[in-house]
Amino acid sequence: MYKKLSESSRNTKKALLVGLDVIALPIALWAGFSLRLGEWWPQNIDNVWWLFFAAPLVAVPIFIRMGLYRAVLRYVGSKALVTIVKAVTITTLILLALMVMSQSHGVPRSVFISFWLISLLFIAGSRLVLKGYIHSYTRKIKNKQPVAIYGAGAAGAELAKAMQSGWEYEPVVFLDDQIEKQGVEIHGVKVHSPTELPELIEQTGLSQVLLAMPALSHRRKHKVLEKLGACQVQIRTLPGIADLVSGKAKISDIREVDTGDVLGRNAVPPIPGLIGKCIRGKNVMVTGAGGSIGSELCRQIVENGPAKLVLFEQSEFALYKLEKELEAYNLGLEIIAVLGSVTHSRRVESVLRSFAIHTVYHAAAYKHVPLVEQNPIEGLQNNVFGTWRTAEAAKAAGVETFVLISTDKAVRPTNIMGATKRLAELVLQGMAEESDTTCFTMVRFGNVLDSSGSVIPLFRDQIKKGGPVTVTHPEVTRYFMTIPEAAQLVLQAGALGEGGDVFVLEMGDPIKIDDLARSMIRLSGLEVCDEDNPEGDVEIKYTGLRPGEKLYEELLIGDNVTGTEHPKIMRAAEEKLSWKKMLHYKYEFEMARNNFETKKVKLLLEEIVSGYSADKDIVDPVWNQFCLINSDADNPDRGLSVDSDNLVDEPVEGLVEAPVKESVNERSLH
């Protein structure tokens, strides 16, 4: 019966409801007479027998007109019940009027009060009973997962209502810290204290807790997560209140717990005057626009009123995906998607001049520590020469502001990636002293949650596969920040620049990667398998530090740091090199790069970058294979013999000397 009712067509269900109403209304009228007159079949009924035919004939057209047969049974709610009350009231009044006009005698008027009450019971009850049957069948065939809802407020009530009408989850309990709410029922679901959760898990078999508190602060949510972490349940959450208000998300949208909640701190609201200073009404370009940081910068830039936004990206798919996403915002903003490499100075400068760019956010870089360690020449080419050439192109094109996205790994680096990023900082510091038109600024911060190459996506995939979760060392500690917070602070830091500034973002307290892995396992509803709990679900495996990896990261090279007008942005005064010296090293690095001399690149980095040591083993597979092949040669360290005539990409003379903000002459580009 359940299956036939649930899977029948809409017309069949309508016909069923009409049939039930046609039967129920005469029965309600008879019950009204019987209750009022205290007889099983009062004699007065014989005088008004026609009312039993008139009741459905009057009521059904009224019910059709008021939409009672349009309502979907599964979603029958308070609005439908109000409509039923109105329809039954109108029907009762019409029947009463018909009886008065027929001048029938011996029929008490109070019979119609009983009829009205019993009709409401039958009509509304039939819908609610059918709704219950359908829900029971839905739970039976779909095996809906029992879940608990943490938060018995408006959001929790809406979520429970949506789930009861859905096919995937069934709310079995509410959890709430407020004592006055405990014990009450919301949509038939009882509210319990969170301390009862272990017993409720055993009783109901629930495996998930859904946090229905979209307006809760990160700090408060962090405490809730710690409280729930002791229970073996998966924790999911509703979108934030800002997304709900803006319409980007709905109450029924459930997602995994935001990894930002693990940080337990709130982002500082942006200062409007800062975040829009280099953007509003200006032409802006983001290099590496398709990356994690670059794409988030673009999302926030379009919300701050630029005149144009140029997306400069080497990856075709990443550029296509971002362009489509930003166009969907439908803000009427001109968005230009440009394929290109930051190492191609002529291409970069042609773009800057063609679109009269005022502000550049340089996010293009190779950031994965082990991969750059294995490919040091490409790391040097992209991170150092890509920055150098883009900065030179910006200076030549008269760009007002150039902001480099740097990293905490540039501080006393132990790896090629960090050393090349510090060298890029030194390049901009030197260039800032030589430039009167372009303001060069660097922003340095730590790891970004859920970025490409971050441990978060890796851990999440490993947990889904049942483990093991790989951590390099139990004591590895890192600074973390969410992608939106990092991008927001970068935009504001760029507006604070005076030329050659190194800005450092306040990252909060460092977090152990081991603790992060354990938190993610617990928030997934699983237990860590270790010596204390050998029956746990997911094992944590320590793999050892990778080449160039540090136990701890730093944000400052020295102690000379001052505050700014933003509470989370500091200005660091750090050592610089003269521009003359930088040009000397540029020549040396170019020669080493052109001959693919990995060993020489490392030695040069040791000379110029404070804290970097070239003593570590070279893990570049190309270099090691070359040395293996030439191990019997007189000088295996001389580098690969490669024709390097076409490797150096210097700006075309006519392009560099072109007037500021004018379009490039097509002839000079070919």
Image (spheres, rainbow, N blue to C red):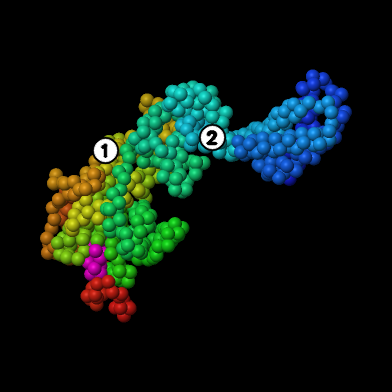
Residue 506 highlighted magenta (yes or no) = no
Q: Quadrant of the N terminus?
A: top right
Q: For the point 67% across and 35% down, which residue is it? A: 85
Observer-nearest of 94 and 35: 94
Per the picture, the main secondary structure of the magenta-coloured stretch is helix
Magenta residues? 387-400
In the visual, does 384 lie left or right of 73? left
Mark 1 Cα shell of 10 Å, populated few (<14), some (14-19), many (≥20): few
In the visual, does 137 lie left or right of 162? right
Q: Quadrant of the C terminus?
A: bottom left
Observer-nearest of 145 and 173: 173
In the visual, does 97 lie left or right of 186? right
- Residue 197 appears anywhere in the view: no
- Residue 499 appears anywhere in the view: yes
Kind of residue sitting beneath label 1:
Asp
Kind of element beneath mark 1: loop
Kind of element beneath mark 2: helix
Q: Is residue 348 above or below residue 111?
A: below
Q: Which residue is mark 1?
A: 509
Question: Reading the chain from its start, which is encountered first: label 1 or label 2?
Answer: 2
Q: Which residue is mark 2?
A: 160
Kind of residue sitting beneath label 2:
Ala
